[in-house]
Image (cartoon, grey):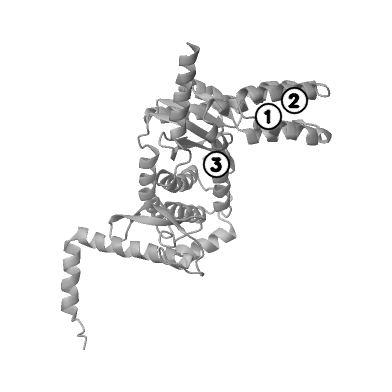
Amino acid sequence: MTRVKSDAEVLLMQEALLDDPDFLRSVMQATLQQFLDKEQTFQLGAEPHERTEERLGYRCGSYERTLLTRVGRRITLRVPRDREGRFSTQLFNRYQRSEKAFVLTLIEMYVQGVSTRKVAKITEELCGVEVSKSQVSALAAGLDAELAIWRNRPLQAHYPYVYVDATMLKTRTETRSNSNEAALLAVGVRESGHREILGVLLADSESEASWSTMFSDLRERGVESVGLVISDDHRGLVNAVERHFHGASWQRCQVHVMRNLIAKCPKKRLKEVVPMMKDVFSAPDRTEADRRLKMMMETVSTWNEDLADWLETAIPDALSIHDWPTEHHRQIRTTNMLERYHGELKRRTRVVRIFPNRASCLRLVTAMVMEMDELWTTGRRYVNPDMWEEENKENKKHVREAS
């Protein structure tokens, strides 16, 4: 018959565990890891290597994620992946930085009296009605410190590809009750092929000065050179790139170019012009792309000289991908990757409508990109780094043959 442990015995066991923090951490780590693995098994409907008709998917490795537990111990867990990317866990929901930042934003709105009825209702359910400004400040201080450390971390010296873009967020400022603030974002691709969030900045506008501030910060944190910058057409941004990363190439986003073309072209000519533009972008090399562009301009000039002039000026900057490995063209021809993030940011902040202050806006934006960065730097490669080496070998071969 099993003997029930006395209160004294339970206390002795608790003291033994707490006297050895490393042992306590290892026990908690093993328990939570088992929880994650079992959670994936439940969602896939099968154990590892199990053959069953009820299987809903297949495992595909894992990535590491750190978790600060309630006992103040930071542990590292392997979060499982599946081939379809559908696995989701409830384990981190109460710990995610972005969730903390989002909740703090709602509370700040409530305390400052700028909340909607929906926000007020959510805030009351989260923490009750009685919330003071001092309590909000105390809650935000720890998270802000963690986010600031991440924003100022050292970076690598060289990034072959860097994507930059901005999105506008409504924010209250000291002088305006409804100001459109520009959230600037820079994403780099490491020489290992992995993506990394390089920087995030909140600015009054998407100007040359604000982009210069962003790039100056990247240089101060260790970035010395950039191979190719991918962005929308923004003269101030391009000027800032030339100033801070002299020698970097620029790839104008092909999706934005197509949107610009559709806006400029007479509607009755779209069925003729759009396929020609797609044909230019799908050319196998730069020589063929230039040839197709020339033919397109000659055709367009017969009925719209201004549009032909615009094509001659705008399109060459959208063909810089041909100076880089063909296998990377799909990834580097547009800024779609960043636009997907901006869409997610807008979705997450829909209930907020307008941030109560710039600090809360920067807090949530940083928390979201920080979590994305953890996934990218430990996940699969975005591009195959071997292609850069192959390209270098091919270039050296041509140089030897020419000499």
Q: Residue at x 49, y 23 (%)?
A: 248
At label 3, which amino acid type do we have?
Met
Element type at marker 1? Answer: helix
Q: Position of residue 384 (x, y in %)?
A: 46, 37
Do we see residue 260 in this rendering? Answer: no
Q: Position of residue 165 (x, y in %)?
A: 55, 36
Disc number for residue 296:
2
Query: In the image, is residue 267 above or below residue 116?
Result: above
Q: Earlier in the sequence, mark 1 or mark 3?
A: 1
| Label 3 crowd (10 A; few <14 / some 14-19 / many >=20) | few
Image quadrant containing the N terminus: bottom left
| The residue positioned farthest toward the front in the image shown | 401
Q: Which residue is mark 1?
A: 280
Q: Earlier in the sequence, mark 1 or mark 2?
A: 1
Q: Position of residue 122 (x, y in %)?
A: 52, 62
| Label 2 crowd (10 A; few <14 / some 14-19 / many >=20) | some
Element type at marker 2? Answer: helix
Do the residues under discs 1 and 2 have CB atoms within 8 angstroms? Answer: yes
